Image (cartoon, rainbow, N blue to C red):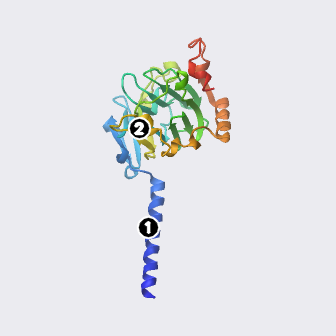
Amino acid sequence: MNRIKYLFEFVSVLFLMFTANTRARGRGGTDFDVHYVVTWGQDHILKLNQGKEVQLSMDQSSGSGFESKSHYGSGFFQMRIKLPPRDTAGVVTAFYLTSKDNTHDEVDFEFLGNRQGKPTAIQTNVFTNGQGGREQKFVLWFDPTTSFHTYGILWNPYHIVFYVDKVPIRVFKNNKRSGVNYPSKPMQLEASLWNGEAWATNGGKDKINWAYAPFKAQFQGFSDHGCHVNGQSNIANVCGSTKYWWNTRTYSRLSANEQKAMENVRAKYMNYDYCSDRPRYPVPPSECQWNM
């Protein structure tokens, strides 16, 4: 009986340790250094909460940034971000995928600062073979400077979906069969805080007020849900496989509820769509007909 009691108590302790460890990981997330590396502005980056949170800062001398150690060919990339508060006109916080070559592919979230009391704008963009110009802008329906919010990019063989707190706000479909370019090069995940006063706020008319520097943005959630393609070829076959959950049928299209939620956000909060900009594009780009 004593032996059975001992075994029962031992298993119970192991279970409690496992549960506590799981909850701790759930609260704290993955350590930054496991999947990411600082790329610039090393003296403007601070690691907090035992590496579970990173603070980027920017002053007149420099901004800062980091990137994933791996290159990816598909995935569902999410990060929790708290943006710089107060007067942030001209300040850009970015979270994006990029291949970084001369004819690069890129998928962007850019948060455009504003004068104090005015809403922060979020700009999305998609580059293929070095060509961008596919901006869609939104006014956020919450204050992104007071708490963390989750921003996500789903990239699979079917489409690219931009998410804000699990709500889809934009879809860019894969229509290569119709002659529309689609991001397909290995890309790294990057984040940065930088000086965009030449264009970011009010067309570049509102410049950075350095009296509010240093500007600080916090990042959490450094998990790795992507298909690694480091040194691999034929990434379309490797990273398009349904062995990755983000490539399964569930993620091949939006659900009815997601579609409804996206339509609501776009109707209320989208304030620029390149597909509707006739002075800029008298003839809408070919992908616009597929991504309405």
Tell me if residue 137 comes above or below residue 191 in the rendering.
above
Q: Residues within 10 Å of mark 1 (few under 14, many from 20)?
A: few
Tell me if residue 79 comes above or below residue 270 in the rendering.
below
Which residue appears at 67% of the width and 29% of the height? 267
Give the camera-side residue of 211 and 120: 120
Q: Is residue 213 visible?
A: no
Q: Position of residue 274 (x, y in %)?
A: 57, 20
Judged from the image, the secondary structure of the residue bearing numbered disc 2 is strand
Q: Is residue 239 visible?
A: yes
Q: Amino acid at mark 2?
A: Tyr
Q: Residues within 10 Å of mark 2 (few under 14, many from 20)?
A: many
Which residue appears at 64% of the width and 35% of the height? 262
Q: How many numbered marks does the figure carry?
A: 2
Q: Quadrant of the C terminus?
A: top right
The residue at which mark 2 appears reads as 72
Can you tell which mark lies on residue 17? 1
Sequence-first tag of 2 and 1: 1
Q: Position of residue 123 (x, y in %)?
A: 53, 28
Q: Amino acid at mark 1?
A: Met
Residue 138 location, quadrant: top right
Give the camera-side residue of 116 and 189: 189
Distance of mark 2 from mark 1, alpha carbons? 34 Å
Q: Position of residue 221 (x, y in %)?
A: 45, 46
